[in-house]
Image: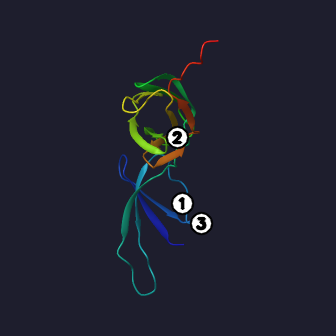
Amino acid sequence: AEPIFVYSTEGSPSVLSHSLTQDGSMNLLECGKTYRVQVTSINEVTESTPIEQSIIVGQTPGAPINLRVTESIPTTSIKIEWNHTEDTGCLPLRSYILTVNGVDQTSLTITGDTTIITYDISSGGAIGTIYTLSLRAVNDKSEGLASDSISVTVGSVPNSPS
């Protein structure tokens, strides 16, 4: 295979030359770094114009774990907590996407080690309303897998006195 050239965009530019493996992957690239890749096709007659593209070496993050509702206030809010995924795809987590009843609601920007949010239900959280929630982590590569879904029934109607 013809070598390709990879230019690091972090620190001082350096040129690395690698051959593609049989499955089209490259070795020796550092996880979490951004590279500019230039590809040129060459045959016996001519050489193509190079195509360049930046790539981030990393993976899709894993799902947040232990999603749980820690407080539910009818007609007001639901407090949600979770644990960060241990699989960040070797890239920093940037945000989370909360899905409520199958609809993405908001992208939550991470500040520090945030693992708690309060979701506003003031426009429809009547007693007895059921919410199904899940959460996805986002890194610089892509959105990750959804956490296990949880359901919460806002408030409850008490039983009749006996």
Quadrant including the N terminus: bottom right
Q: Is residue 32 above or below residue 132?
A: below
Q: In this view, does 73 lie above or below 44?
A: above
Residue 8 screen position, x and y as percent:
40, 53
| Residue 65, quarter of picture | top right
Alpha carbon of mark 1 to alpha carbon of mark 2: how far? 21 Å
Question: Is residue 159 toward the left or the right of residue 46 in the image?
Answer: right
- Is 19 in front, or is 120? 120
Quadrant including the C terminus: top right
Alpha carbon of mark 1 to alpha carbon of mark 3: how far? 9 Å
Q: Disc 1 residue type? A: Met
* Of the image marks 3 and 2, the number of the one nearer the N terminus: 3
Q: Determine whether the residue tagged by mark 3 lies in a helix, strand or loop.
A: loop
Q: In front: mark 1 or mark 2?
A: 2
Residue 111 screen position, x and y as percent:
39, 29
Q: Are marks 1 and 3 in contact (CB under 8 Å)?
A: no
Residue 116's mark? none
Q: In front: mark 1 or mark 3?
A: 3
Q: Residue furthest right?
A: 162
Q: Residues within 10 Å of mark 1 (few under 14, many from 20)?
A: few
User: Pointer 2: what residue?
Assistant: 88
Q: Residues within 10 Å of mark 2 (few under 14, many from 20)?
A: many
Question: Is residue 23 toward the left or the right of residue 53 in the image?
Answer: right
Q: Disc 2 residue type? A: Thr
Residue 53 screen position, x and y as percent:
38, 61
Q: In front: mark 3 or mark 2?
A: 2
Q: Residue at x 39, y 39 (%)?
A: 106
User: Pointer 1: what residue?
Assistant: 26
